[in-house]
Image (cartoon, grey):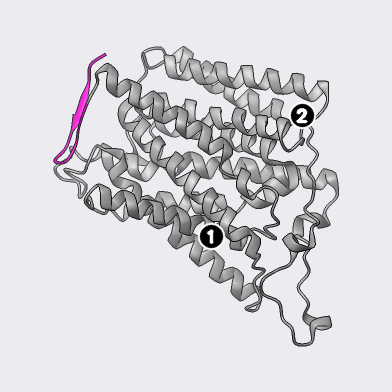
Amino acid sequence: MDYWVADNNHTVSGNSSNLALGFTASVVSVVLFGSNFVPVKKFDTGDGMFFQWILCASIWIVSLVVNIILHSPKFWPLAMVGGCVWATGNVTVVPIVKTIGLGLGLLLWASTNLLTGWASSRFGWFGINPEEVERPYLNYAGAGLSALSAIIFLFVKTEVKSVTSESETTPLLRNSINSEEHAVTDESWVDKFSPLQRRLIGSLLAVGAGVLYGTCFVPVLYIKDHSKNNESIYAGSSQYDLDYVFAHFSGIFLTSTVYFLIYCVVMKNRPRVFPQAILPGFISGILWAIANCCWFLANTYLSAVVSFPIITAGPGLVAALWGVLVFKEIKGMRNYLLLILAFCVVLSGSLLTAFSKT
């Protein structure tokens, strides 16, 4: 298998070492995506708005380091749009984890992410070039199995434990004046619903987040696809995906900051800020940023058609292992059998989608 892409700064050849780099990047991305919320799992993050801002600030700092290492490649503002889309989905993460758990939540949004990302690249949505595959029947079968896995995951029951420690549930910012009238409750809005309502809300949020995550790479793909069109403003743009990380992550941080400021206005300048979530949230952001950088690398060395199904399906397996072995969110033989079945289905779908290109 020989191929190459080149630009002014980078040349990527299709030899075995680069393929090995691509698969290694995919494995690292899978492990970190499946584990990046673990550091914050046992800390109360309230409604999640402060946590998501800390997470995105950490992500942007990592991108700044990457940008310096790459000697500041050209900044394309359109790539920020993908970051904006991702940050919008990220706002829902904490409510998802609080309602249906880390394992099931990540499995659901990863499956939807896979299906959305596959459809947009396969059929050329949003102005990007459609991906041609050697075996379209395998491609469609893989997408169908991925959709089926999401349905199977819905039948997996989880037991999510609430954090009750006073040291972990006390907000940093409280209104000390007229406290009886203005006291900030420690109860998250998701705690007000019944178990069935929490499950429904969490599942819908996870699917919505998956759709947003599945389209966040579209702006970068659009820029790359139009790089060879001399009449396009993106003519001559880089084919090396990591060159777009800083712009993409800048969109993430900008959007998360806007959401947090809107949240502060809605809360009448009394945001719920939990100090115990700061360091875990920062670590979580670093893990996510490294995982996403590895995804950009995998897109370069393997192409998105190969890397996308692997990296979107794999983290769910890692997260479920955390949910079963550490957090004890998933229990019972019935749930274990359903998880095994779901794992087999999603892995089969990923492999079929990847093999359809070769």
Instruction: Find the magenta span and give its range.
Output: 1-12
Q: Amino acid at mark 2?
A: Phe
* Residue at 67% in and 68% down: 272
Mark 2 closeness class: few <14, some 14–19, many ≥20 residues within 10 Å:
few
Q: Is residue 247 visible?
A: no
Q: In front: 24, or 102?
A: 24
Q: What quarter of the picture does the C terminus occupy?
A: top left
Mark 1: give few (<14), some (14-19) or many (20+) Cα within 10 Å: many
**Residue 135, can we see it?**
yes
Question: Which mark is drawn over residue 54?
Answer: 1
- Residue hosting label 2: 155
**Snapshot quadrant of residue 279:** bottom right
From the top left corner, tell me how far across and down residue 271 is, in percent: 64, 72
| Residue at mark 2 to residue at mark 1: CA–CA distance | 33 Å
> Which quadrant of the view contains residue 302?
top left
| Left or right, residue 15 beside residue 355 | left
Q: Is residue 73 magenta?
A: no
- Taking depth in this image into account, of 259 and 28 the one nearest to the observer is 28
Residue at the spot 28% in from the left edge and 20% down from the top edge: 17
Q: Residue 241's mark? A: none
Image mark count:
2
Q: Is residue 213 left or right of residue 231?
A: right
Q: Residue at x 24, y 21 (%)?
A: 14
Spot the residue most to the front. Answer: 167
Lower position in the chain sequence, tag 2 or tag 1: 1
Q: Is residue 259 left or right of residue 268?
A: left
Q: Look at the picture and state if 215 lies above or below 318.
A: below
Indicate the amino acid at tag 1. Answer: Ile
In the structure shown, which secondary structural element does the residue marked by tag 1 occupy?
A: helix
